[in-house]
Amino acid sequence: MEIRRIEDNEKTGEFINREFTDYAVDCAVALNFEEFTFAAEDDGKIAGVITGRAYYNEVHIGDLIIGKDYRRAGVGSRLVSAVEDAFKDKGYEKIALTTFGFQAPEFYKKLGYELEFVREDKDPKLSKYFYLKRI
């Protein structure tokens, strides 16, 4: 057996989806899997993007990226709200996410996310914050 780094491709994607699904079925757990991307656009220009996955009973926000010209203009709040609205009545119980100290811990707190844990780093900017919100 050889272990090697590869670029994501259709073959690995099919393997992951099949095995992820089969394992949930074997464990008698509803998979409820869905990937998502929402974009905020301003006259055809992307102002921000939020991505993630929903599975089992949880939605996980992976990335929230706001263009430099659109920061502090409500774009991030609107994107997070879009995710909350999209998944609130679909059988999911919570939304989870992580952010680093230099990114947006206070932003998520203002949106009603509860801090579950902080994994401290010697550089506080790189401390990782774990947030959760029940929906």
Image: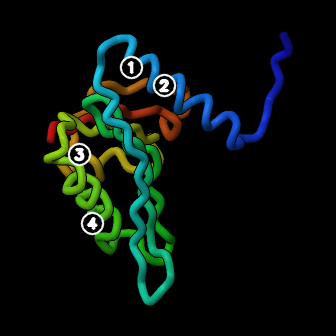
Q: Which residue is mark 2?
A: 20
Q: Nearer the viewer, residue 94 or 47?
A: 94
- Give whichever of discs 1 and 4 has the lower sequence position: 1
- Give whichever of discs 2 and 4 has the lower sequence position: 2
**Relative vertical location of residue 12 with respect to residue 44 in this rendering, above or below:** above
Q: Which percent across, then down, holds residue 107?
A: 30, 53
Q: CA distance from mark 3 to mark 1?
A: 32 Å
Dot 2 and dot 3 residues touching (CB under 8 Å): no
Q: CA distance from mark 1 to mark 4?
A: 32 Å
* Residue in view at x 47 percent, y 59 percent: 65
Tell which tag, 2 or 4, sits nearer the viewer: 2
Residue density around tag 4, few if under 14, some if 14–19, many if 20 or more, within 10 Å: few
Q: Which percent across, then down, holds residue 51?
A: 44, 52
Dot 1 and dot 2 residues touching (CB under 8 Å): yes
Give SS at disc 2: helix
User: Which amino acid type corresponds to the residue marked 1 in the rendered image?
Assistant: Ala
Dot 3 and dot 1 residues touching (CB under 8 Å): no
Q: CA distance from mark 3 to mark 4?
A: 15 Å
Q: CA distance from mark 2 to mark 4?
A: 31 Å
**The disc label shown at residue 78, or none:** 4
Residue density around tag 1, few if under 14, some if 14–19, many if 20 or more, within 10 Å: some
Dot 2 and dot 4 residues touching (CB under 8 Å): no
Q: Which residue is mark 1?
A: 24
Q: Is residue 125 left or right of residue 27?
A: right
Q: Which percent across, then down, holds residue 43?
A: 44, 89
User: Which amino acid type corresponds to the residue marked 4 in the rendered image?
Assistant: Arg
Give SS at disc 4: helix
Q: Which percent across, then down, holds residue 101?
A: 44, 41
Q: Which residue is mark 3?
A: 109
- Give whichever of discs 2 and 3 has the lower sequence position: 2
